[in-house]
Amino acid sequence: MAVTDTAKNGKDCLADIAAVNLREEILIPHPANRDELLRRKKHTPARLGCWRCGPRCLTGTLLRFRADHAAAMDAVFTEVPAEFLTRCGLFAVSTLCRSKDEYLTKPYLGRKFSDETIAFIQGKCRPAPSVQIYISDGLSGAAIEANAEDTLQGALQGLKAGGIDCGTPFFVRYGRVRAMDEITEALNAKVTIVLIGERPGLATAESMSAYISYMGYPGMPENNNIVIANIHRAGTPPVEAGAYIAHVADRMLKQKVLSVHDLKL
């Protein structure tokens, strides 16, 4: 692996080890079947064939682990910028959490809204939509910046093509998944969809999920929701995810089933 690169200003600098595609990198000195190893690595983000130095991993492997761990921590503390909300045309509200620290240490506050916030949402959004979709930062603001815009547009286009009326999209800061039940009740939505940043890992810090409920309510069992996970550039592409979200919402409305276990896709 190259350790230096020449920057445009002519000075040597360290190469970004996080930019290396691990699915295409082989560290085993003399693999018995290189093509088969590459084929298997292509289908998983697991770090296959890291090789070793005595009982320890290679220095490059250790540094990559630390770089990916740092990226995951950054993703948790990344705030979704105002420019993103402006570009997507979203207004923003917050849960009862007043900061990222409070969001991380008091998860129950991320599931609730103040009475004033609920009234504000009701004043800004169209009541009783067939589908209400919103975005929330969750545990990865980086995931929202990377995926939410294309996913939202794909879902809205799919719903429109299916003749399904959709409520006013907006953004919830410091939101947990179960905040969607409060929103369902406040807006009297049939189907509620939240696009939310997932807990970052070493495979990616930009994974987003879509949670979808039908006729939700506060206290609704979590296993009644449909979850479309791993929405990111190396997983389910955002545009494709948006189209599938619209399809699931359409199935829910037509079949009128409260539990995901009874839904036929």
Image (tube, helix red, strand yellow):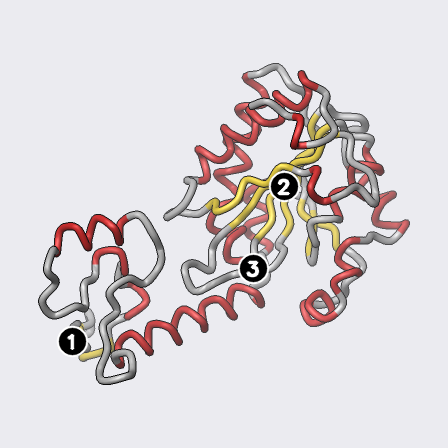
Q: What number is the disc on residue 10?
A: 1
- Name the residue that disc number 2 marks: 211
Residue 204 rendering spot, x and y as whole percentages: 43, 58
Q: Residues within 10 Å of mark 3 (few under 14, many from 20)?
A: some
- Name the residue that disc number 3 marks: 199
Task: Determine whether the residue tagged by mark 2 lies in a helix, strand or loop.
Answer: strand
| Along the viewing direction, whichever of 176 and 59 lies nearer the viewer | 59
Identify the image quadrant of the C terminus. top right
Q: Is residue 204 in view?
A: yes
Location of residue 119 by image quarter: top right
Instruction: Tell me: 67 left or right of 104.
Output: left
Residue depicted at 64% across the width and 25% down the height: 263
- Indicate which disc, 2 or 3, sits on the residue closer to the N terminus: 3
- Indicate which disc, 3 or 1, sits on the residue closer to the N terminus: 1
Q: How far apart in space, not on screen, are marks 3 and 1 (Cα)?
A: 39 Å
Q: Which kind of residue does numbered mark 3 sit on?
A: Arg
Q: Is residue 123 in view?
A: no
Residue depicted at 62% across the width and 54% down the height: 137
| Along the viewing direction, whichever of 238 and 8 lies nearer the viewer | 238
Location of residue 77 by image quarter: bottom right
Q: How far apart in space, not on screen, are marks 2 and 3 (Cα)?
A: 14 Å
Q: Which kind of residue does numbered mark 2 sit on?
A: Tyr
